[in-house]
């Protein structure tokens, strides 16, 4: 039995905060979600770290990660249409697996959404270097503040802004792919040789364990499709459009990320150049400085674009947590406030401003922590999907994944194995944060279960369900 809210309590619970406006369709939702995946930022900021450790195995690792994301996307699509809430994972998991599990899902998602934007934002300075040399921390902080201001605008306006930036970053990724393939130094068989440059110019084989250890980062690199679930309260006809947006985003982003990675692997002059991960230098070597500058500027715009969408996404998570009474009353009231443009302006500031300060913190180990958090979050969603067809949930109108329950069962097994293979220090950091969150649940939320952590669906969804009953 899940720890759900009794009907008598729900009837006497405080009124819900004003709802978000349904203002975007599949195209707008896909543009915003793709911008959160931000293929160019992934390609130019995250992938170089994989190149440095995995060499020619990077493309294989990302391909495996993308394949693993298919059953994950199925779980998100089914649960996102069944429970369309701005709370995303925590709303789905709370409703189906219990309120404690949902709280832990919220903590995992909060870890991801608070850490990732500043980490990516600090990469902006590297790609503005052909034009102007800037301090990475100051530049990252500026990007976070600009993204925060954009996040205060109407969501429809942001869909157009991020859509324009998205076109530029896809063009940049396409240019890199074209140059890499036309300057290939090795054949496609190199993708299966799994080699990496070692010390003193030695070439070392990549082991299967190295590939498995990189899968958490590969999952993180392709995980932005979950943004469609966070936007489900602002998508028109969420029962249909959430699944379409999730699956379309995964397909497009997989191609946009993987194809250039293959091209770079084949086009790099030698393994030392490949593992160096300096994609801008490779582009200049394949073409000229003007093309290299163009690509770098497109990447800088892509990072800004990612910052805008991540701030939008993250503010919706905090807004939903306040509406669901996760915090003391003054905090809930503040985070649930909507501004002139219909955006949760206090929640947006709470996400964006601390992100600017995080740009001055050493975040090297947080890549690993984020990878563990993403894997743990997917694990909770997969478990919830196993419970999504029990009782009344099984008869509700929703998109249903194929091969259930085999798909989530297989996913759970793989995700547990990936977690076991992660660096123990990353597991300890994430476990420690989870332990603190559990204590908050035990001593604050659970004793106030009648008035705190009341996970709910938007009123228009509840009205529709009542009409169908």
Image (cartoon, helix red, strand yellow):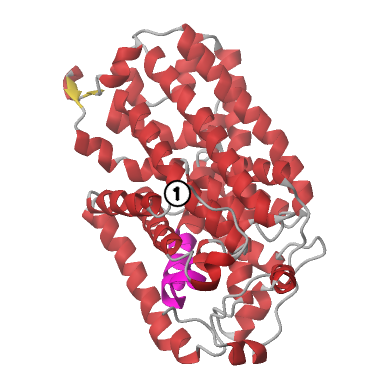
Toward the viewer: 12 or 174? 12
Q: Can residue 416 be seen in this view?
A: yes
Q: Which residue is drawn at 64% across and 75% down?
A: 323
Q: Can residue 143 be seen in this view?
A: no
Is 361 or 69 nearer to us in this picture? 69
**Residue 34, percent across and down?**
60, 40
Instruction: Say few, some or many: other residues with alpha carbon within 10 Å of mark 1 (under 14 / 14 to 19 / 20 or more).
Output: many
Residue shown at 71% from the left, 77% from the top: 17
The vertical placement of 188 against 127, above or below, is above
Pick out the residue farthest to the right.
340
Would you say 142 lies left or right of 216 here? right
* Residue 93, position as x, y percentages in the image: 47, 67
Magenta stretch: dominant SS?
helix
Badge 1 marks a residue whose secondary structure is helix
Circle 1 is placed at which residue position? 72
* Image x and y of residue 329, in percent: 61, 85
Determine whether, in the image, residue 427 is placed left or right of residue 280. Answer: left
Residue 170: give x, y in percent of width and height.
61, 28
Segment tinted magenta in the rendering: 93-111
Name the residue rendered at 68%, 46% in the picture: 29
Residue 302 is one of the magenta-drawn residues: no
Residue at x 71% of width, y 74% of height:
466
Work out whether 52 lies above or below 315: above
Q: Is 104 a magenta residue? A: yes
Which image quadrant is residue 313 in? bottom right
Quarter placement of the C terminus = bottom right
Say whether residue 306 is left or right of residue 372.
right
Task: Say left or right for 468 vs 448.
Answer: right
């Amino acid at each position: 039995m899940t720890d759900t809210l009794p009907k008598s309590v729900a009837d006497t619970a405080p009124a819900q905060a004003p709802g978000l406006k349904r203002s975007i369709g599949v195209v707008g939702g896909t543009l915003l979600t793709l911008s959160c995946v931000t293929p160019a930022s992934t390609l130019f900021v995250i992938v170089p770290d994989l190149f440095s450790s995995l060499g020619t195995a990077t493309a294989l690792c990302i391909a495996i990660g993308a394949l693993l994301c298919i059953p994950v996307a199925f779980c998100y699509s089914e649960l996102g249409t069944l429970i369309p809430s701005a709370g995303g994972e925590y709303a789905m998991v709370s409703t189906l697996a219990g309120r404690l599990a949902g709280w832990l899902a919220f903590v995992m998602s909060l870890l991801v959404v608070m850490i990732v934007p500043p980490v990516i934002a600090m990469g902006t300075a590297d790609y503005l270097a052909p034009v102007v040399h800037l301090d990475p921390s100051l530049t990252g902080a500026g990007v976070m503040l600009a993204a925060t201001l954009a996040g205060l605008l109407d969501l429809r306006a942001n869909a157009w802004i991020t859509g324009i930036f998205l076109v530029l970053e896809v063009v940049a990724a396409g240019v890199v792919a074209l140059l890499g393939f036309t300057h290939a130094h090795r054949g496609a068989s190199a993708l299966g040789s799994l080699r990496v440059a070692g010390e003193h110019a030695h070439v070392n084989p990549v082991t299967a364990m190295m590939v498995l250890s990189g899968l958490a980062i590969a999952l993180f690199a392709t995980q932005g499709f979950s943004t469609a679930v966070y936007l489900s309260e602002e998508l028109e006809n969420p029962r249909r459009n959430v699944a379409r947006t999730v699956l379309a985003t995964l397909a497009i982003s997989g191609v946009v990320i993987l194809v250039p990675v293959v091209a770079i692997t084949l086009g790099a002059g030698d393994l030392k150049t490949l593992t160096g991960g300096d994609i801008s230098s490779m582009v200049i070597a394949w073409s000229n400085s003007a093309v290299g500058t163009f690509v770098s500027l497109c990447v800088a715009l892509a990072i800004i674009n990612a910052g805008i969408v991540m701030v939008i996404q993250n503010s919706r998570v905090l807004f939903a947590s306040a509406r669901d009474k996760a915090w003391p009353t003054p905090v809930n009231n503040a985070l649930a406030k909507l501004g002139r443009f219909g955006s949760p302006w206090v929640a947006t500031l709470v996400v964006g401003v601390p992100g600017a300060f995080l740009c001055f913190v050493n975040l090297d180990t947080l890549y690993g922590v984020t990878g563990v958090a993403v894997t743990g979050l997917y694990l909770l969603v997969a478990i919830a999907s196993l419970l999504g067809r029990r009782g009344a949930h099984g008869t509700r109108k929703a998109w249903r994944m194929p091969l259930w329950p085999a798909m989530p069962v297989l996913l759970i097994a793989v995700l547990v194995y990936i977690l076991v293979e992660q660096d123990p220090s990353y597991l300890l950091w994430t476990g420690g944060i989870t332990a603190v969150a559990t204590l908050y649940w035990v001593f604050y939320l659970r004793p106030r279960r009648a008035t705190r952590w009341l996970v709910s669906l938007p009123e228009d969804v509840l009205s529709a369900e009542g009409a169908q009953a």
